[in-house]
Amino acid sequence: MEIKKGGVVRTIDDKNQIEDDKNELEIEHFLSLDSLLTQKHVGDGSLSLRLIRDMAVWRVNNLSWLSEFEDGLNDVNK
Amino acid sequence: MNFVSAKIRLFRIYSIVLAITGAFVLNCALGQPVSSDEAKTATANPNIPGLNQLDDSSSETSGSRTFNNRVDEAAKEIVEDLTGARSSAEAKELIEKIFSSEASKDVKYQAQKLSLRKLASLAEEEGRFEDAQQYLAVYVKRFPDDELIPVVLLNQGELYRKMGAYDLERQKCYDVIKAAQGVELDRDKYNLNYVKRAVLTAQINIAESFFDEAKKMPTKLAEMGFFNSVEQFQTLTKSVEQFQTLTNSVELLDQGSEFDGLELGELNNVDLSLKLIRALHELSISKRSKLSISKRGNKESIDADKQEVEKSFKEVHDEGDRFIKNYDAAATKKKGEVLYYVLHAIRNSNVAPSKISSELLKKFEDLYKLNKENDVKTLPWILKGAGELGQYFFQKGKDEKGKKDEKEESFENAKRVFEMHVELIAGGKGESEKLLEMLYGLQYAETLIDEKIKQNSLYNDTFNDVRGIVDYVKSGAKKIGLKLPLLSNLGEIGVDEDGDGRDAYDELLTGHSDTNPDNVPSRSEVDEKVKLKGVGNDAGGKDANEEKLFVTSDTAPDGFSDNEKLKNMVTQSIKYLKSQANIRYRHILPVLYNLGLCYENLSNIDEALTVFERIPAAVVKVNPLKGEFVDDAIFESPDTPLKFQVVKLLDNDLYPDAALVCHLGGDQKGGCCSYYR
């Protein structure tokens, strides 16, 4: 799925925020490292870089969840 | 081994064939066309008919002594020209002139020697090693008692090395040692020191030859070659020390010397010691490699072999320490290389595990400090050392079972090394995303310039709009050792000091002077350099040049072309920065990932998150419809899989509504939003 100029994004982190109060931003420019991870030649190292990127994303999601879970656990124990 | 012998035999046959053709070429070059029968005997018989003819100068019988002197002087001048000849064709022309002249026998005799050496060196420069070899072979045959024979033989040996015939090279080196004993000494430059230098150089070449040959072999088979090389270098180190004591002249060894156009290279203790350490390092690796085979086969001899390997690595360690202690003034890259070998050796030696970590870290810090010298040739050694050491500590942490403190210590050490590694590539702590930010800065500046071009704005207005960004990017690039020369010339745009109609930027670009009105670049010359053609500014289907032609001078304000120049500078800089980003991120990302894993293993979740978030980095510029960017907020698209978390808001004055984000999902391919627009 391509990210297009003009695409709209909304905040999702604040659970108490009601739908209408969410921040809403229109994307004007998106610059990422992804072109490095697009394989141009077999064996150019792109595959392992893409794997590192995907593993990092997985770890961010996982650790964020773990962090939230522990916070929640602490709240319960209080 | 059979293959090598067959190769040598083949090479010898090839040499004979070349000897025939080479002599033929030589005779022709000397202006004496000879039949192929005569050419065949060229190397076997030193009395080559063509050359003998040249020896028989008729000058003895001609005219007065004054006339002869004049002819000789003229011939000597041509000989001088021959020394500086840059191609074989030029040299052959001059040689023909010398030998068709009436010069004396003596002048022609000396010219013959020089001709052969010159033709050989030119052939070598031109990559015709076989021809070069042949010219030198003729020299050795014709002038066996010449004082330059040891140097000529050395030259032949070096040619053999370039041709991959290592054993033939070593044979030539042994010939040098033999020939050096027969040199008739004088009190000038062909003295005892000359002979000793020639012998030492031959010995060094033998050691290097073993090393180079072993390097081309599979690691497990190379042990003998490296062993021979180590042995030679060890003997040589002692010989050079003795030689220095005898001659009491270190300078003599430190400088290369020239003997009638042939050079004897540098001989110094620093280089010898470095070569010895290099050979010891390779020998140790080869031994360890063999050990891994014996581990699978015969278990009984493992202990002895293991001790042998450890001893070998200890030698590298000791020699390396000695080098660092004795040669503090050695070049940074040499110290870097030695410290890398020492680090490698410590990891493989039998130093007590409790001591090894602190020693490794200390040595690594010494290596890391060399980076302050900003030497590009040292950096690869530091990076290599950092990568391997970080991995070593990380693996050690993983392998420690049940010992919590030691496990933690290893991950702590690995973290420290990986952090230093990232700093080496990114230029500072936590600066890994700096390149991305700079790249975004220039792309944003390009967008601003495009808008100004559309509005036909004056150059000064455009420049003022992007000046802050350009300065910020320039200083950021400098910090990480990148140069963006085009961005340094912005002040030259629109300044025409000599009033010739071309500004200082055009003149600088095309290599003309802006202080001389007669030194004006043509329009096409400028366009070629600026490469405006094909750089479309908008979607109008016309490139910048066509559009410029379309706009008449009546309608175009003065600043129009200057804006395009500015855009061109920024575009070129973006291209360069992208290539650098490609190279650097390929190195940084794996190290960052390992660093994150270290934090994770140390149960430092917040730091681990900070590091992992830097891997899928992106810069987003938005148009706030409702609310604004907030630190750490997560944004998601309702209709695409795009999801990102804000990591850092960028400077709002320079880059309004832009932030560095961690890209958590969604692809960016092509179009306006991709990395390569």
Image (cartoon, rainbow, N blue to C red):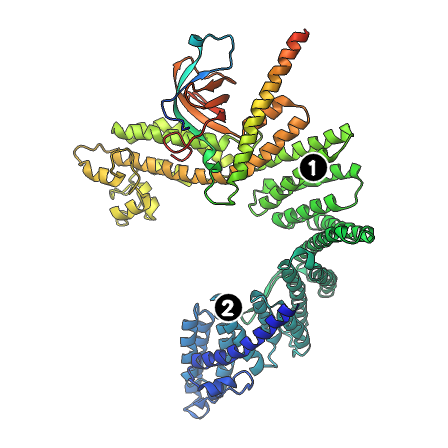
Q: Residue B249 placed where, x, y %?
A: 68, 62
Front in this rendered view, residue B272 or A22:
A22
- Which quadrant of the figure has residue B169? bottom right
Dot 2 crowding, Cα within 10 Å, few <14, some 14–19, many 20+: some
Q: Earlier in the sequence, mark 1 or mark 2?
A: 2
| Residue at the (55%, 85%) spot, across then down | B46
Q: Is residue B494 visible?
A: no
Q: Is residue B100 above or below residue B361?
A: below
Q: Is residue B322 above or below residue B20?
A: above
Front in this rendered view, residue B595 or B236:
B595
- Which quadrant of the figure has residue B185? bottom right
Q: Residue B671 placed where, x, y %?
A: 36, 32
Q: Residue B108 placed where, x, y %?
A: 48, 82
Q: Mark 1, chain letter?
A: B
Residue with the most extreme front position: B297
- Res B395 label: 1
- Res B124 label: 2
Dot 1 crowding, Cα within 10 Å, few <14, some 14–19, many 20+: some
Q: Residue B401 placed where, x, y %?
A: 76, 32
| Residue at the (70%, 46%) spot, across then down | B344
Between marks 1 and 2, how big is the CA–CA gap? 49 Å
Q: Amino acid at mark 2?
A: Glu
- In the rendered image, the quadrant that contains the N terminus of chain B is bottom right
- In the rendered image, the quadrant that contains the C terminus of chain B is top left
